Image (cartoon, grey):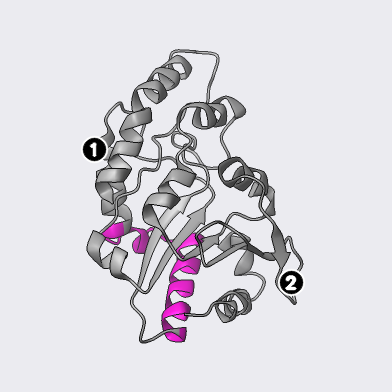
Amino acid sequence: MNDKLFELYSSKWHNLCSAVKQINDEDGLEIKPANPLLLQVDKEEDFVMADIRVVIYGQETNGWYGDFIADINPILDCYDKFFNRGECWSYGGQFWLGFSKFWKMLEAKYPEKKIRFIWNNIVKIGKSGDKGFPPDYIYEIERNYFSVVNDELQILKPNLVLFFSGPNYDSIVKDNFGQIKYEALAPYSERWLSQLQIPNVDFAFRTYHPNFLWRNDIESFFRTIIDRTNY
């Protein structure tokens, strides 16, 4: 699985580096690209054999491993250290608190099931040293030279996917997965909480970033999602 991810990233790396260099060399472009979020699966066999394999998508990174570097391995190590080794839980912030709460609630629902999680972002290349959606010239590089989100999903083969991206990122979801049907989950509107149909994924949902959910009874959102699943 990690070998396949590495092959995927490597197949696009040269062209990505060339495109990023053009931006970094252009003094008129003040905002520069961060390193892409490259996934590294911890204990691959455990993930493959898990009863419930979950991928949770955030929006984009708040910077990632400093300025862009032309080397895949340190960026993979950064993900491994941050997520797999647990640095993320001391990072703080509403996203990781929400991620942790969903994890615990899902485990409480399925105490006899083996559950494993992967963290990803729907936007793979953010802004160097900053947060928020990148400028169009950075996002266009991702679309043209590093469109890997759908391929990552085919490699990981999760049976549960959750987008903490909110409705304003639905166009980004479409860029990666094509036209997707959104079904509102009562009592919420389609914008607040929807179930999605993604090929070869048992259950997929899109709701807001946890920063919003914490102000609007996050447990109710998560109960609605988890009650919709059946494992």
Residue 3: percent from left, percent from top = 25, 45
Is residue 142 shown above or below 45? Answer: above
Name the residue: 61% across, 43% down: 172
Mark 1: which amino acid? Asn
Name the residue: 51% across, 45% down: 60
User: Which of these two is toward me, 211 or 142?
Assistant: 142
Residue 38: percent from left, percent from top = 36, 43
Say which mark, if any, is on residue 188: 2
User: Would you say 149 lies left or right of 6 here?
Assistant: right
Q: Residues within 10 Å of mark 2 (few under 14, many from 20)?
A: few
- In this orientation, does residue 192 appear? no
Name the residue: 50% across, 68% down: 98
Mark 2: which amino acid? Tyr
Which tag, 2 or 1, sits closer to the chain's start? 1
Query: Is 59 within the magenta?
Result: no
Name the residue: 43% across, 22% down: 20
Say which mark, if any, is on residue 73: 1
In which image quadrant can residue 128 be found?
Answer: top left
User: Would you say 176 lies left or right of 3 here?
Assistant: right
Q: Residues within 10 Å of mark 1 (few under 14, many from 20)?
A: few
Residue 143: percent from left, percent from top = 54, 31
What residue range appears in magenta? 84-109
User: Would you say 24 lies left or right of 82 here?
Assistant: right
Say which mark, if any, is on residue 90: none
SS for callout 2: loop
In which image quadrant can residue 199 be found?
Answer: bottom right
Q: Provide the major secondary structure of the magenta segment.
A: helix
Disc 2 to disc 1, C-alpha distance: 42 Å
User: Which of these two is toward me, 186 or 202?
Assistant: 202
SS for callout 1: helix
- In this orientation, does residue 58 appear? yes
